[in-house]
Amino acid sequence: MKSLIECIPNVSEGRRDDVVARISAAALAAGPGVLLLDSTSDRDHNRSVLTFLGDGPSLVRAMAGLAAAALEEIDLTRHQGGHPRLGAVDVIPFVPIRGATSADCVALAKQLGERLAATYSLPVYLYEDAASSEGRRNLATIRKGEFEGLAKKMADPEWKPDYGPSRPHPTGGAVVVGARAPLIAYNVNLGTSDLALADRIAKAIRHVSGGYRFVKAMGVKLEERGIVQVSINMTNYEKTPLHRVFETVRSEAERHGVPVVGSEIVGLVPQPALLAAASHYLRLEADPGPQVLENKLLDVAFDALERSAE
Amino acid sequence: MKSLIECIPNVSEGRRDDVVARISAAALAAGPGVLLLDSTSDRDHNRSVLTFLGDGPSLVRAMAGLAAAALEEIDLTRHQGGHPRLGAVDVIPFVPIRGATSADCVALAKQLGERLAATYSLPVYLYEDAASSEGRRNLATIRKGEFEGLAKKMADPEWKPDYGPSRPHPTGGAVVVGARAPLIAYNVNLGTSDLALADRIAKAIRHVSGGYRFVKAMGVKLEERGIVQVSINMTNYEKTPLHRVFETVRSEAERHGVPVVGSEIVGLVPQPALLAAASHYLRLEADPGPQVLENKLLDVAFDALERSAE
């Protein structure tokens, strides 16, 4: 089976669609065989999230092409937007999807980091599973101070980059490259307008305040519907599964007499996360994944694709 | 998107592996583009179930090739086995998988029926969604009397076949061709050795005795584990979903103080059946199917396959 990896560069441009299109096109041209699954731009954040899929070597080539185009098109000294950012290409995570491990993605992150530093004199920080120390695992810590504070931060030997020079690229800043598990953005809607309750439940489930290891969460008001939501980022659905978090939210809400009125997944979700939920509630004795007809099709389709590529 | 249909011929040979292999090979040779997903032979039943996947026209060509080989290789006058059968190729259902409807599969069944009758002088009965009358929907009714009673049954004008002569093929009998929804074989295991309870619950959920419209069920003893099982055939998981049947079994068992200790899916299962269960229990506000990453991959893979075939 062909190994499949997802790569989700976040670039600091979300307003000029033509620029984003040229950056995507540069990635695809540099990495034949790579597919663009999704491109989402946020005007307030002035940032775009591009989702690419391919095998490891093709993705590294594609990301080198993307970085070249982004450095040419984006000048961070003139960039404004609501989302924290350190560079023109702000962050590039590799995520294992099929037939690939976290270790494979760490190796790709390091390979890409070396290449970006060598080719574009760009300082590179490794994060999450690729981090060189515990203190660099967290993206928010690395990004603290943003582009505007980067020169000062880098003067501190503690913030010497993992690759490249100890000074920012003049217009491109720095890039954070890493490997992580697939993220799921998941929201649970409560039948109340009491934002304090959503906040209290978010606190109960999130890691920092004593909750699940791989959960980030906050309370959010849904003005139009007149209800509140526990807005969740699941950072590792294999270790902290969706259904366990859902049940905890439900139990905490019910303790206050508030029902869960619904839940929603935002963006893409790996199939195993939902199969695990089905499996939990139906008390399945075996992982149903290998029996899913569509997965047989996927194997067959990729085999055929590989043969046709030979 | 390419339309994908499953076709699952059951042939009356489950002991001579070389014969089954030749029959499969004949199907693939006659229908280029068709894929063999699975081949399962049962020695006691002396019967093999072959699972093919492809587009409609290719599958019709493949099934004509399969019938020719089966008629050549199998002599029903000498066939013995534990499973009821009417013909060398006993039954051929078409099942819609992606981008195809039940009506498409009915049309294919009729097209194949006409072709088998014309080419091999084989009597053909249409069943399930392709049936020409309500009395012919049920496979068991058509098959009653088996090969040995077929000549007598066909003498009755009521059992004139839908296509072909009103007498059995001398060594090949008759074939039953049709269209149906995907089947799910699903078992729920109970924490008791009381077979009567499993039987009572089976009766509560199955259609014939007042249960769900698309459920067949019976109680079965699992000797090795010392427990009993409600063994279920789900004949339309869209209209009678898995989780609803599971919850009814659980409720009926709990009323007698018996827990559900597990459940199992036998063979292949369409992804939407499990996503519907996840969606039910997680109270998802939208069908998660379009957000499943693997489904995006499947679309991309099939698009690429089609382009490479052009």
Image (cartoon, coloured by chain):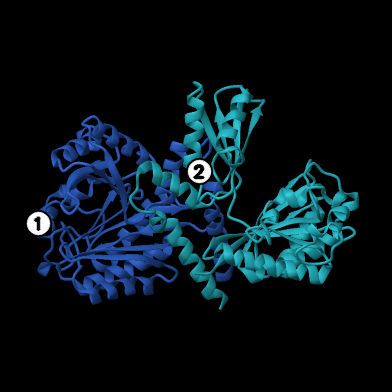
Chain colours: A blue, B cyan
Residue shown at 10% from the left, 69% from the top: A78
Mark 1: secondary structure: helix
| A207 sits left or right of B103 in the view | left
Between B77 and B168, the residue placed more toward the observer is: B168
Label 1, residues with CA under 10 Å away: few <14, some 14-19, many ≥20 = few
Q: Which residue is mark 1?
A: A149
Q: Position of residue A280 (x, y in %)?
A: 44, 37
Check disc 2 and give the amino acid type. Leu
Between A66 and B297, the residue placed more toward the observer is: B297
Per the model, the C-alpha gap separating discs 1 and 2 is 56 Å
- Label 1: chain? A
| A152 sits left or right of A121 in the view | left
Label 2, residues with CA under 10 Å away: few <14, some 14-19, many ≥20 = many
Tell me which corner region of the image, top left, top right, bottom left or bottom right, holds residue B154. bottom right
| B219 sits left or right of A48 in the view | right
Respond whether the residues carrying marks 1 and 2 are from the same subunit.
no
- Label 2: chain? B
Check disc 1 and give the amino acid type. Gly
Compared to residue A158, the image places residue B308 above or below, namely below
What residue occupies the far bottom of the structure in this picture? B310
Residue shown at 40% from the left, 62% from the top: A53
For marks 1 and 2, give the one nearer the viewer. Answer: 2
Q: Which residue is mark 2?
A: B242
Q: Position of residue A96 (x, y in %)?
A: 41, 52
- Kindly tell me whether residue A273 is visible in this rendering: no
Q: Quadrant of the C terminus of chain B?
A: bottom right
| A91 sits left or right of B180 in the view | left
